[in-house]
Amino acid sequence: MINLGEYNELEVVKQLDFGVYLRAGDVEILMPTKWVPAGTQIGDKLSVFVFRDSDDRLIATTVTPFATANTFAFLEVKQSNNFGAFLDWGMDKDLLVPFREQPMKLEQGKSYVVYVYVDKTTNRLAASVKLNRFIQKDDVSVMDGDMVDLLVYSETPLGYNAIINNTYSGLIYKNEIFEAIRIGDKLKGFVKHVREDNKIDLSLQKKGFELVDEVKWRIEKILKENGGTLPLNDESSPEEIKATLQISKKAFKKAIGALYRDRIITFTGQGIQLVKPR
């Protein structure tokens, strides 16, 4: 069985002037010469990506696309017309976003988060910007505290929505973001809480003592980079702390308290000072 739009391990069964044929069951798939690895012989098994070319033929390649079937990705529009938008996904043939899969007309030169899928009607790869159709909302398997992979896909008044582990959606609240993020960013994050309605709150920081340790390390690092002093203390504004360290004032106060108890910093009239080289 061939998994269209995915990687398949196939056996080389023919070698011709224009390429090799690989077999999956009763199906033989061409890999053009330009993609055949040097030294390939009949009987070799190759891990290849399978897609359809402009003539609708199944083709195998060793080229790595920017996205595979059943995944979310951030891709740029190369061309947009009344038939749809065509995305650059790292392959010779661009990936189509049918007009019906666009909640708004996609603009050439801009990038969008899309879901790549196999169209059941045409049996071709396509992409959609209507992400909610492909986000799993039930049977949530992540738990509070889990580290997860995130793909930021939209901004709301409350914060940023992100795809979680290529499966679920969650929200990162703006008042808990201490670094610049943009739509399309791939990040590591943490499940803050899974609600009873299966909605997921996310955080870019660890909780509790793990977070304190991380912030302590960051403050000490920046102190060393600034000659051992920083003009920040308990009286500094949240805005000053965020601008300098990209953390909240609450996290800052916990961390400098721990650094002081460990005799790594001391407090001065101007801020904090590193006293224990490490």
Image (cartoon, grey):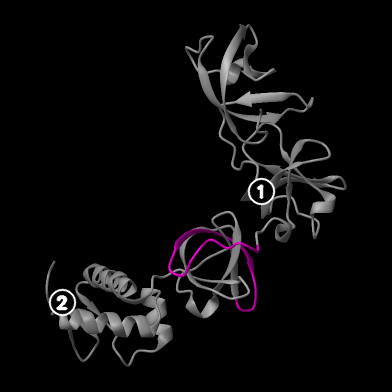
Q: Residue at position x 33%, y 81% from top?
A: 252
Q: Position of residue 38 (x, y in %)?
A: 48, 15
Quadrant (top left/top right/bottom left/bottom right) for the N terminus: top right
Residue 3 is one of the magenta-drawn residues: no
Q: Residue at position x 61%, y 35% from top?
A: 6
Magenta region, residue range:
137-158
Which residue, given by chain and number where applicable, does mark 1 sit on? 76
Label 1 residue SS: strand
Q: Position of residue 119 (x, y in %)?
A: 78, 42
Which residue, given by chain and number where applicable, does mark 2 sit on? 264
Q: CA distance from mark 1 to mark 2?
A: 48 Å
Residue 195 visible in the current orientation? yes
Quick one: 187 or 139, which is closer to the camera? 139
Disc 2 marks a residue whose amino acid type is: Ile
Q: Position of residue 98 (x, y in %)?
A: 81, 47
Q: Classify 212 as above or below 109.
A: below
